[in-house]
Image (cartoon, rainbow, N blue to C red):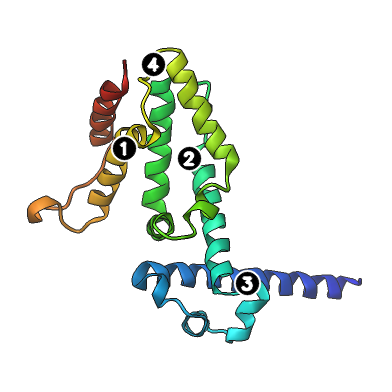
Amino acid sequence: MNEYSFIFASRMRLRNENKEATLRLKAIEMIVKTGFDGLSMQKLAKAAGISPATIYIYFKDREDLILQIGLEEIKKMTEATLKNFSPEMSFEEGLRIQWMNRARYCLENPLQMHFLEQIKHSPLQEKVYRNDTHFINTMHQFVANAIKRKELVHLPVEVYWSIAFAPLYQLVKFHMSPRSLGGREKFVLDEKFMNQTLKLVLKALKP
C-alpha cells in the first residue's frame, strides 16, 4: 500500500467510524424521546442522513442495534463509575467515590443516562446489565469486604441499592428538572447537598 492509498483508507475508516457514531447517537436520542416503539430503521436512517441499507452494514437488525448500543453505553458508565475506585477501600471512601463518579457521569451524559434507564426496564436488561461481570464482581467484593469489616449491615441487594444509590439518582433527577417539587425554583445539586445526603445514607447503612 502506497502513501496515498494509506491516507485514503484512513480517511474512509474515520468516515465510517463517524457514521456509526452518528447512528448510535441518533438512535439514543430517538429512544429517549419516543421510546423503543418509536425507533424504526427508516426513521433512524432519515435522522442520520443515510440510507436504511447502510444501517445493516453495522447492525444485524433493530434489536441488535439497541443491544450493541446498550452494551457500549453500560461499558462507558462502568468505566466512569470505577475510576479511582478499589473494592479494598473502606466502605465510606468507596461509596463516596462511587457517588462522585456516578453523579459526574449522569450530569455529563444525560441522554445516555435516560437511555440506560429505559434499557433497565426492557427485555434487554439482563443481556446488557449482566454482561459486565467485572463490574458485578467488583461491587460484590466491595460489599463483602465492608460487611466483613463490620462497616456495613448485611442487606438484600435490592434494599442495599435503594439506600446506597437511589437517593443520589433522585438528586440528579431533581437537578436535571427545570423545576423542583411543588413548582419551587430549580434545585441545583452541589457538593454540599451531595455530602449532606451521603452522610445520612452512610448512617443508615452502618451497623
Residue matched to label 2: 81
Residue matched to label 3: 59
Outermost residue to the top:
149
Q: Position of residue 54 (x, y in %)?
A: 63, 81
Q: Is residue 196 visible?
A: yes
Q: Residue placed at 38% from the left, 29% from the top?
A: 96
Q: Is residue 139 above or below residue 49?
A: above
Q: Label 3 vs label 2: CA separation? A: 28 Å
Label number found at residue 9: none
* Residue type beneath disc 2: Thr
Of the residues under marks 3 and 2, which one precedes in the sequence? 3
Please rate how many residues cluster around mark 3, counting C-alpha atoms within 10 Å: few if below 14, some from 14 to 19, many from 20. some
Compared across the picture, whether 40 is left or right of 96 comes to right
| In this rendering, the label closer to the viewer, 2 or 4 | 4
Q: Label 1 vs label 3: CA separation? A: 35 Å
Residue matched to label 4: 151
Q: Residue placed at 46% from the left, 25% from the top?
A: 143
Quarter of the image for residue 121 reads bottom left
Q: Nearer the viewer, residue 64 or 28?
A: 64
Label number found at residue 162: 1
Q: Secondary structure at mark 3?
A: loop
Q: Position of residue 64 (x, y in %)?
A: 58, 68
| In this rendering, the label closer to the viewer, 3 or 2 | 3
Q: Residue placed at 9% from the left, 56% from the top?
A: 183
Please rate how many residues cluster around mark 2, counting C-alpha atoms within 10 Å: few if below 14, some from 14 to 19, many from 20. many
Of the residues under marks 1 and 4, which one precedes in the sequence? 4
Compared across the picture, whether 154 is left or right of 76 comes to left
Q: Secondary structure at mark 4?
A: loop
